[in-house]
Image (cartoon, grey):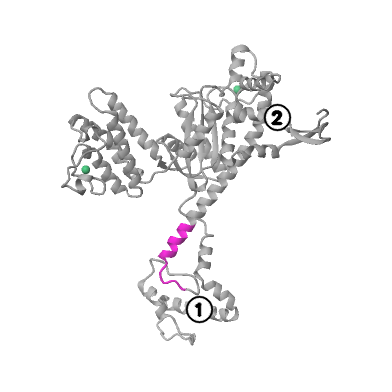
C-alpha cells in the first residue's frame, strides 16, 4: 500500500503544505496501537469523524500490514546477521588468543612455532639460545644427517633469507616484529569451535492453559549483542476464512485468501514446531543457531535432530529453573500430608537463586551447595560450607534461621524426605545448571505483544495477529523509528484540491 502524502494549497498561509494522509496513518496506528475495527471506529467517533465500514478497515489493515511485515523482516534479518557476525568474531578472537598463549618456542622472524607434540630434541634446537649468530654461513658441521638436522638447516637458510629481506625493507621488518600486527592478523581467522550463534527462545500463547489457538515464538540475540529480535514466528491452529466457508458454503471451494492455518495438533506442540521452523529459516538465511537459551522444553531439540539433522546445545534460563522448583514446591504444599508454608517456599526459592548465581562455571560447587540446601534448613550442617552457612562460620554464636518461621530450623522428617526427593533431579542436573543462559528479553517482547494484541481480544482468526507480532519485532529492533521506515518504504505524493 502506498502511504499517501497530500500537497495542499493553504488559503491562510498562501503556500504548499505536505501532509501524510490521515487515514493512511490511522491504518498504521490500527496495527501499532489502536486495535481492531471497532476500536478504530470508536477513535474516529471521538474525533467527530465518519466511521469506516469493518470490511474496508480490514482491507486497508491488510495493505498496511504487508508493509509492516516487510520492514520487520528486513530489520530482523539485519539483526540476525549483526548478532551472528559479532558472536563469531568474538569466539574467533578468544580462540586465537588461547592458541597464541599455547605457542611455545615461537620463531619471531617466521611467525611460526613447533607443534605441541613435536620431539623435545627439536624443541631444544629451535630455542632462541641455539639460534645462529649473524655471521652464520650455510655449512653443515654434522655429517650424519637426520631429518631433524635437515629441518634445522632449512630453517637457518630461511632465517638468513629473512634477514637479507629485512635489510632491503626496514619498514616491513619493523611491522612484522610488532606483536600487535600478529594479533590483528589472528582475529581474521574464522572460528573452529562454533558454527552458529546463541539465541534466547521463548514461546507465548494467547490464552492461558494449553488450548490456545495461536502462539508466537521470538528468537532474540544475547544482551551483549543488543537483545534484538532475530526471528519472529506466529502459529495458528485455525483460519477464520476457511472456517466461515466450511460453515456457510460447504459445497463451494474456499475463496482465494492468505490462509493462516499452519499448525495441526495440540497447542503444547506449537512450541517445538514453531521453534523448529524458526531455526530452519535462520539456517537458510545464513545465520545458523547453535546454542538455545530458554525454558526446560527439550522436544524442539529432539525434533530438530530427528527431522532436520540439526544439533543444538541447550542452556537453561535461570528464572524458569527457579519458577519450576517453585511450582513443584507449591504442588507439595497442596498435598495435605505435608506441612509447608508459603514463607518456607519463598525462602527455598531465594536460596536456589543464590546458589545458581554464586556457582556459575563451577558444577562441583553447585552440586555440593544444592545437596546441602535441604539439610541446612533442618539444622543438619554436615554438608554445609562456611562460605554461606553462618553456623559453620562461627559456632560460638547461636545460629538462627532468620527467614524461617520462628527463626528456627524445620523439624518435620516427612517434609525433609519429600524435599530431598524433590531436589534429587535438580542435583543431577547440576552440570547443566552451572552454565545458565537468560531468556528475559523474550519476556519483554511477549509483554510488548500484549500491548498490541491483548489477551482479552482475539486477533488470531486472520493475519491480523501476524501484523501485530511483526510490528512488535520491528519496534523492539528499531524503536519508534520503524514508523518512519515504513514511510520511507512507500510514499506517494498526490495534489490536494482543497484546504
Ligand atoms: Zn484459510
Ligand atoms: Zn548450614
State the quadrant of the C terminus: top right
What residue is rendered at 25% in x and 22% in y?
336
Marks counted in the figure total 2
Residue that carries the numbered disc 2 in the rendered image: 24
Q: SS of the residue at dot 1?
A: helix
Q: Which residues are magenta?
A: 93-107
Tell me if residue 338 comes above or below residue 97 in the rendering.
Answer: above
Mark number for residue 404?
none
Looking at the image, is mark 2 or mark 1 earlier in the sequence?
2
| Few, some or many residues within 10 Å of mark 2 (<14, 14–19, 20+) | some
Rendered location of residue 429, percent (x, y): 32, 41
What residue is rendered at 56% in x and 81% in y?
164
Ligand 2 shows up in the quarter that is top left
Q: SS of the residue at dot 2?
A: helix
Tell me if residue 329 comes above or below residue 89 in the rendering.
Answer: above
Tell me if residue 213 comes above or below residue 193 in the rendering.
Answer: above
Tell me which corner region of the image, top left, top right, bottom left or bottom right, holds residue 244.
top right
Tell me, yes or no, if residue 318 can be seen here: yes
The overriding secondary structure of the stretch rendered in magenta is: helix
Q: CA distance from mark 2 to mark 1?
A: 73 Å
Question: Which residue is at the front of the view, 296 or 137?
Answer: 296
Tell me, yes or no, if residue 256 can be seen here: no
Residue that carries the numbered disc 1 in the rendered image: 159
What residue is rendered at 30% in x and 45% in y?
366
What residue is rendered at 51% in x and 77% in y?
158
Amino acid at each position: 500500500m502506498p502511504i499517501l502524502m497530500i500537497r495542499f494549497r493553504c488559503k491562510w498561509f498562501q503556500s504548499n503544505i505536505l501532509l501524510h494522509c490521515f487515514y493512511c496513518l490511522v491504518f498504521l496506528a490500527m496495527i501499532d496501537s489502536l486495535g481492531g475495527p471497532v476500536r478504530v471506529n470508536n477513535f474516529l467517533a471521538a474525533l467527530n469523524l465518519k466511521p469506516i465500514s469493518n470490511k474496508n478497515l480490514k482491507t486497508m489493515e491488510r495493505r498496511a500490514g504487508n508493509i509492516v511485515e516487510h520492514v520487520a523482516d528486513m530489520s530482523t534479518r539485519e539483526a540476525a546477521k549483526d548478532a551472528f557476525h559479532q558472536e563469531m568474531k568474538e569466539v574467533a578472537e578468544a580462540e586465537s588468543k588461547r592458541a597464541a598463549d599455547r605457542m611455545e618456542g615461537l620463531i619471531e622472524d617466521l611467525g611460526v612455532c613447533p607443534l605441541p607434540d613435536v620431539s623435545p630434541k627439536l624443541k631444544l634446537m629451535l630455542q632462541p639460545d641455539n639460534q645462529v649468530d649473524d655471521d652464520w654461513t650455510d655449512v653443515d658441521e654434522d655429517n650424519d644427517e637426520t631429518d631433524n638436522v635437515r629441518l634445522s638447516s632449512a630453517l637457518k637458510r630461511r632465517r638468513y633469507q629473512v634477514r637479507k629481506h629485512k635489510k632491503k625493507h626496514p619498514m616491513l621488518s619493523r611491522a612484522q616484529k610488532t606483536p600487535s600486527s600478529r594479533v590483528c592478523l589472528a582475529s581474521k581467522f574464522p572460528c573452529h569451535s562454533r558454527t552458529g550463534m546463541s539465541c534466547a527462545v521463548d514461546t507465548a500463547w494467547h490464552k492461558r492453559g494449553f488450548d490456545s489457538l495461536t502462539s508466537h515464538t521470538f528468537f532474540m540475540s544475547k544482551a551483549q549483542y543488543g537483545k534484538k529480535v532475530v526471528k519472529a514466528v506466529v502459529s495458528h491452529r485455525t483460519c477464520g476464512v476457511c472456517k466461515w466457508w466450511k460453515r456457510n458454503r460447504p459445497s463451494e471451494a474456499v475463496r482465494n485468501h492468505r490462509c493462516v492455518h499452519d499448525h495441526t495438533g495440540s497447542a503444547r506442540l506449537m512450541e517445538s514446531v514453531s521453534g523448529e521452523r524458526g531455526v530452519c529459516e535462520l539456517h537458510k538465511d545464513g545465520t545458523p543457531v547453535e546454542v538455545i537459551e530458554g525454558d526446560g522444553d527439550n522436544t524442539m531439540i529432539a525434533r530438530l535432530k530427528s527431522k532436520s539433522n540439526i544439533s543444538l546445545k541447550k542452556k537453561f534460563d535461570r528464572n524458569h529453573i527457579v519458577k519450576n522448583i517453585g511450582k513443584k514446591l507449591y504442588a507439595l504444599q497442596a498435598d495435605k500430608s505435608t506441612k509447608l508454608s508459603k514463607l518456607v517456599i519463598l525462602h527455598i526459592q531465594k536460596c536456589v537463586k543464590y546458589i545458581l548465581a554464586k556457582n556459575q562455571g563451577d558444577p562441583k560447587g553447585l552440586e555440593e551447595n544444592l545437596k546441602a540446601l535441604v539439610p541446612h534448613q533442618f539444622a543438619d550442617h554436615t554438608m554445609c560450607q562456611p562460605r554461606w552457612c553462618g553456623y559453620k562460620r562461627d559456632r560460638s554464636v547461636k545460629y538462627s534461621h532468620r527467614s524461617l518461621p520462628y527463626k528456627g530450623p524445620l523439624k518435620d522428617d516427612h517434609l525433609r524426605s519429600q524435599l530431598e526427593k524433590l531436589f534429587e533431579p535438580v542435583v543431577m542436573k547440576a552440570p547443566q545448571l552451572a552454565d545458565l543462559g537468560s531468556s528475559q528479553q523474550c519476556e519483554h517482547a511477549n509483554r510488548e505483544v500484549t500491548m498490541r494484541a491483548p489477551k482479552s481480544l482475539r486477533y488470531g482468526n486472520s493475519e491480523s495477529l501476524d501484523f501485530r507480532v511483526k510490528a512488535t519485532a520491528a519496534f523492539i529492533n528499531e524503536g519508534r523509528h520503524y514508523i518512519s521506515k515504513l514511510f520511507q518504504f512507500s510514499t506517494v505524493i498526490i495534489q490536494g484540491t482543497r484546504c
